[in-house]
Image (cartoon, grey):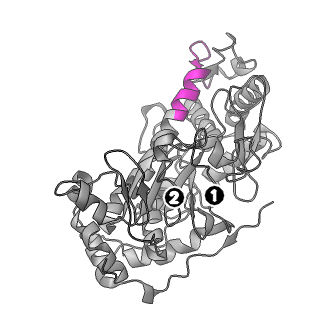
Amino acid sequence: MPKTKTIGLGISEEDLNEDLLRELSEFPLLDALFGRRSRRFFLGAEVPDGPLAYKSKHEPIPLNNVEKLLVLLGISGVTGWHHSITRHDRYKPNLSNYSGSASGRTHPSAAGFHTSEVFFTDDTGTYIFRTRDFAPETRRNDDGKLSTKELLLAHQKRIEKISDNRIHIPNYEPYMEGHNSWVANKPGTFLAFPVGDLAQHTLLNLAFYIQNGLVIYDDINKRKIPGVEKYSHLVDVDNPVPLSFLDQYSLAELSAELATATYSGMLLQQAIGLGGWMFDGIDRLTVLGASGDPDVPGLGFRYDTDERWAMPNPTGLEGVFTSFTPPHFPTMRDAVEALVERKFGEGGPFHSKTKGVWKDTEKVRGNAQVHDEEFIELMTIQAEYIYKTFGKFPATIPSVYSLMYLQSHHLDLDYYDKLFGENSYLSTHAEHLKKWHGIDL
């Protein structure tokens, strides 16, 4: 089992420039939205041919620790307690009990499921940034604002090192799409990407369905799931939801979580003055560790193959990130019980002692209906059927899923000045190296 080490980034208060952080907090949202562009050409880069051929005259300048942590904070920082889902006529007056986490982050997650964590890699190694179940530690001031300095200092302890090496991704197909081969994951660049537990997300949707009187059937093999009929007092067994829809729904929801996380980080790039872009042009199996090439281990996730599956299925890496499915749980019943504990146990969104935003938080959180034994049995019957029938969970989609990457780097402004017209970058990009690094190029 890998032994990760919580390392932080060694940032102290003295490393945080109050003037720069104040400017960052005052950067206009509309400028970030309307000024966002994929700016790929970094210091040290080269486009060897074509109408935009250019070779940088400068050496790469890696992001410093404050810059890296700011980007990570933008991707998936904890911003407070989320407001939960207020009401549903079906089970009034109980609070909706869908969420997996009590915390709100810089990106949305369907029903507050929050099953993703962020990985990142650069010249110093490969890391995980854990904020999925990070209870908020930074309070808003009297003006209702959060201190960027306090957020940075609180979040840096969420970083654990996995490897001393940058993830090796060969810069050619099938490992990387050809149009990214000249620029992605190069020395001096910073690559971050959220990874989601799609098995857990699908379990959370199963619970969501049951709570709303729904049950699934196997539309792929054209049969009902044996055993669900005894729960007709909980769900409508005569009008089940297709299994394929459950999978599509879960994949779409998690894709939105991963995409909005990287988008949030890209907006922050504009405010800091960093170049970069969000993209999906690296093979996810390569990154997760299921390329099949021993010389390209990626993150080293466990994966399995089966003649019933079109692709290998990564499930996780013990001690780092694992999905809610065997082999990381003995059975699907164990995975279901772990899910119930995450939701209703200490620190969970429906534990009465978990802090929150309401004036009487204990009353609000304690009002949610707890998944009782019948509910757990019905979840388990469906989950175990899927696992036994298809050899994995979920049935037709991966157990672990990654989608989008966010690369950050320092722009080579000479390239843009030579080959582009006016306003190809923002004032923050023009001033960045001088303000943040004291460098004049």
**Which residue appears farthest toward the bottom when viewing the image?**
14
The image shows residue 277 at horizontal and vertical percentages of 40, 52
Check contact, mark 1 vs mark 2: CB within 8 A. yes
* Residue annotated with mark 2: 191
Q: The C terminus lies in which quarter of the figure?
A: bottom left
Tag 1: amino acid: Ile
241 drawn magenta:
yes
* Residue annotated with mark 1: 167
C-alpha span from label 1 to label 2: 9 Å
- Closer to the camera, 100 or 38? 38
Mark 2, other Cα within 10 Å: few <14 / some 14–19 / many ≥20: many
**Residue sitting at x 64%, y 60%:** 346
224 drawn magenta:
no
Helix, strand or loop at label 1? It is: loop
- Closer to the camera, 351 or 189? 189
In this rendering, the answer to whether 282 lies above or below 119 is: above
Residues rendered magenta in the picture: 234-251
